[in-house]
Amino acid sequence: MGISESFIAHLIELRTRLLHVAVALLVVFICLFPWASDLYALLAQPLLAKLPKGGQMIATDVTTPFFVPLKVAMMAALLIALPYILYQLWRFVAPGLYAHEKRLVVPLIVASTLLFFCGMAFAYFAVFPVVFGFITASAPQGVAVMTDIDKYLSFVLGMFVAFGVTFQVPVAVVLLVRMNIVGVEKLREIRSYVIVGAFILGAIFTPPDVVSQFMLAIPLWLLYEAGIVVASWMVKGKTKPA
């Protein structure tokens, strides 16, 4: 097979995988669409629970009450279909990988996905109640906290991404060691810098209260330590004599 024929074959394979992904996302989204408003209510529950009795959220644009729940349904569809999306990605790249690369890629993809979900769950169940409790308690006397639903969604998505990426630290550490970019001992030496960086990131990506900053910085540090432990185990297993 010539170069051009091989390239066309790859494009056809890519189109097939993308088509499968699009169909899966569409099917899941259609199934979730009737419950779009319920999904948004579930997403807004951490804030609604901290508002004073009778407190509510508002929609400042005419189309916001329709499109914001739609966005939440799309986000939920993406999360539900993510394992299948990653499977299609794997089907596309697997033929070009060596056996040892396949043994490394599959666990990393699975671990990365699970850790991202764990980061989102940690933000929703642990961080949001603290953050929204601080925000509502800090409102001046006579000021009613009535957040726009679109801005709330943007804030929540930003926090989900921040904590989801934070929980990828063990995967990043393992990859750095596995690719011989940095050694385990060097990772241990720079531990103090990582801790300082974790608190700086916590101050940037969380509201201006100490508790929220700690709730991002401490998990980041602990996940870094977990990555060192896993990387050390992998290095020992690699150097162990047959």
Image (cartoon, rainbow, N blue to C red):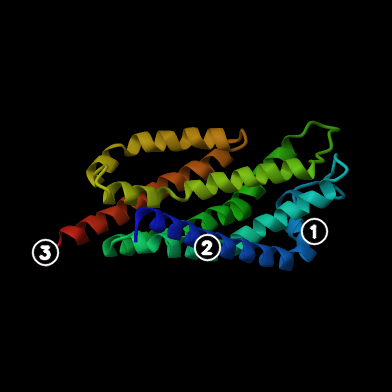
Q: Secondary structure at mark 3?
A: loop
**Residue type for callout 1:** Ser
Task: Give SS at disc 2.
Answer: helix
Q: Nearer the viewer, mark 3 or mark 2?
A: 2
Sequence-first tag of 1 and 3: 1
Q: Nearer the viewer, mark 2 or mark 1?
A: 2
Is 6 on the left or on the right of 70, as rendered?
left
Indicate the position of residue 194 as horizontal and vertical percent values: 38, 37
Q: Is residue 240 visible?
A: yes
Q: Are marks 3 and 2 in contact (CB under 8 Å)?
A: no
Pointer 2: residues within 10 angstroms few (<14), some, or many (20+)? Answer: some
Q: Secondary structure at mark 1?
A: helix
Measure the alpha-carbon separation of dots 2 and 1.
31 Å
Numbered label attached to residue 218: none
Left or right: 1 as drawn, with respect to 214: left
* Residue 241, disc: 3
Distance from the alpha carbon under mark 3 to that under mark 2: 41 Å
Residue 44: tell me if it is visible: no
**Which residue in the structure is indicated by mark 2?**
17
Which is more toward the observer, 98 or 233?
98
Q: Amino acid at mark 3?
A: Pro
> Which residue is labeled 1 in the image?
37
Please tell me which residue is depicted at 65% across the width and 43% down the height of the picture.
Answer: 131
Amino acid type of disc 2? Arg
Q: Residue at x 48, y 32 (%)?
A: 200
Residue 163 percent across, percent down from the top left: 54, 47
Of 79 and 165, which appears nearest the observer? 79
Alpha carbon separation for disc pair 1 and 3: 58 Å
User: In which quadrant is the C terminus drawn?
Assistant: bottom left
x and y percentages locating residue 130 in the rendered image = 64, 46
Could you tell me if the residues under marks 1 and 3 are in contact, i.e. CB atoms within 8 Å? no
